Amino acid sequence: MADTSRRGVFRTLMGDAAAAPLVATQATAAASRVEAPKWGRGIEGQRKADLGNGTYLNPIIPGDHPDPTILKDGADYYMTFSSFFSYPGIVIWHSTDLVNWTPIGPALQKPLGTIWAVDLCKHGDRYYVYIPANPGNQGWSIYVIWADDIRGPWSDPIDLKISGCIDPGHVVGEDGKRYLFVNGIRKIRLTDDGLATDGEVEPAYSPWHFPDDWITENFAPEGPKLLRHNGWFYLITAVGGTAGPVTGHMVIAARSKSIHGPWEDCPHNPLVRTLSAAEPWWSRGHASIVEGPAGDWWMVYHGYENGFRTLGRQPLLEPIEWTKDGWFRALGGDLSRPMPKPKGGTAGQAGFALSDDFTQNRFGAQWSFHDPATDEMSRVHYDAGALRLDARGSSPVDSAPLTCPVGDRSYQAEITLDLDGKAEGGLLLFYNHKAFVGIGFTPEMMKTWQYAEEQSWQRTPMTTGTVRIRVTNDENVITWHYSHDDGKSWMRHPTRMEVSGLNHNVFGGFISLKVGIYSAGEGSVRLRDFAYRAI
């Protein structure tokens, strides 16, 4: 008999992931990459998930948006992500259909060092973000910020002094008390206002363990997210390691009638896992589940795009179904094909234009500093259609660049730089200070940056006051051009570069390769007319 259930429809569309063979091989990207999917095209040709015909194709927000935490608030959905060393950080995104998302703005202004997986929640009429941070690399703690309006203003961060913990997940127990679950999987009670602890960290759950011969990075139980549904508490956890082998990361679940346990492992574990390097999404995990606009249910998690780890971990949306025995199953297979959008809701704009004439402050939503000093924003001055960036440091090696995340496999970006004083300015593709490429200009010469160091043999004498620089990223192959007549004529830089290795598995950090602009030396660099388009 044909399976006409919702699950059957999705199996027909996607195939049964459970039947796929486990291929624990790390094939090269060239060998494993399938034909490029056909995404929708939005602003500036940027890819978008909504295909305009009632279906969507992941990712729902292209680019580096890892560790998604999602909140349903009436008819509105809000989501945010780990922001790591980018400041302003913790950008809140909004949707009414779970597929089309636009940024509201950053919730965190004060640098706290690197920010890992946060939790966004609402209790009563107040919004909270619980933040694991490591200020000055002095040790991890969990902080909290709050707001009465999700659009802000947000409070300054409050240190909850939960040392050595990451990945908080907020939940209200059957006793009406508030708790945070953390990596481990452990829990700690909060005060009723959620702004302090009311107890000690204690063990909460011993997670389901995969067979020892599975190819994973490590065990690493983390990312606990909790939901109360039909009298049960459901605990969704990531295990297997965030990166490393593509088959490592996975989603598991457990349930209990009490927040204090005992917890029963889901018989369908793992609910999500990449089974082969041939799949379009690698290292899938770190999930939350959420009710859709029409009452159906969905899972949001992250994954690396096959062959494009440089784009970071991207948010993926997958349908689930509740089973008769009170568990749930994922229905999306390997996410290689378009799927029906959530029913109900209203489609809004997807993303936003990255091109910037610098007449408005777009810090947080678009621009951010990488690993800034506490006074880094004092370098920024808006000046009649330009952004003047005071010089700091001697080169990109010791200066915090201004960065812009991207979500397309191939793109062009260009900008005009005016050099004031003895400043040096340039355009980069920047992962971190150990991994970047780019070209820069002083008043006297052009410099080349590759392997995170200057290639001094390529210094080219060149008088420069104003220069327009273009970078073309064609599936990780980089070409540079520059113009001294405002783009009327262009010169190609003699060196093309390949950047697929500038990713977490090589350099750590869990981040992505971003467009970067630096200002070093003495004086300042004026940024004008930033233009972006996907290709």
Image (cartoon, rainbow, N blue to C red):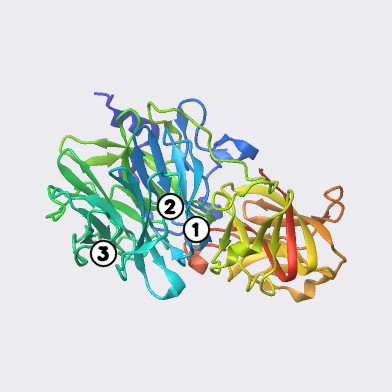
**Residue at (83%, 68%) from the top-left corner?**
443
> Residue 70: which numbered mark, if any?
none
**Residue at (27%, 24%) from the top-left corner?**
2
Q: Amino acid at mark 2?
A: Trp
Nearer to us of marks 3 and 1 is: 1
Specify whether residue 505 is in view.
yes
Q: Which residue is mark 2?
A: 154
Asked if 535 appears above or below 521 in the picture, the reply is: above
Q: Residue 469: x, y in percent?
A: 76, 55
**Residue at (12%, 47%) from the top-left corner?**
257
- Quarter of the image for residue 521 reads bottom right
Q: Amino acid at mark 3?
A: Gly
Crowd rating for badge 2 (residues with CA inside 10 Å; few <14, some 14–19, many 20+): some
Q: Which residue is mark 1?
A: 109
- Badge 2 marks a residue whose secondary structure is loop
User: Front-most of 173 and 246?
Assistant: 173
Q: Which residue is mark 3?
A: 184
Crowd rating for badge 1 (residues with CA inside 10 Å; few <14, some 14–19, many 20+): some
User: Front-most of 37 and 100?
Assistant: 100
Q: Are marks 1 and 2 in contact (CB under 8 Å)?
A: yes
Mark positioned earlier in the residue sequence (1 or 2): 1
Q: Are marks 2 and 3 in contact (CB under 8 Å)?
A: no
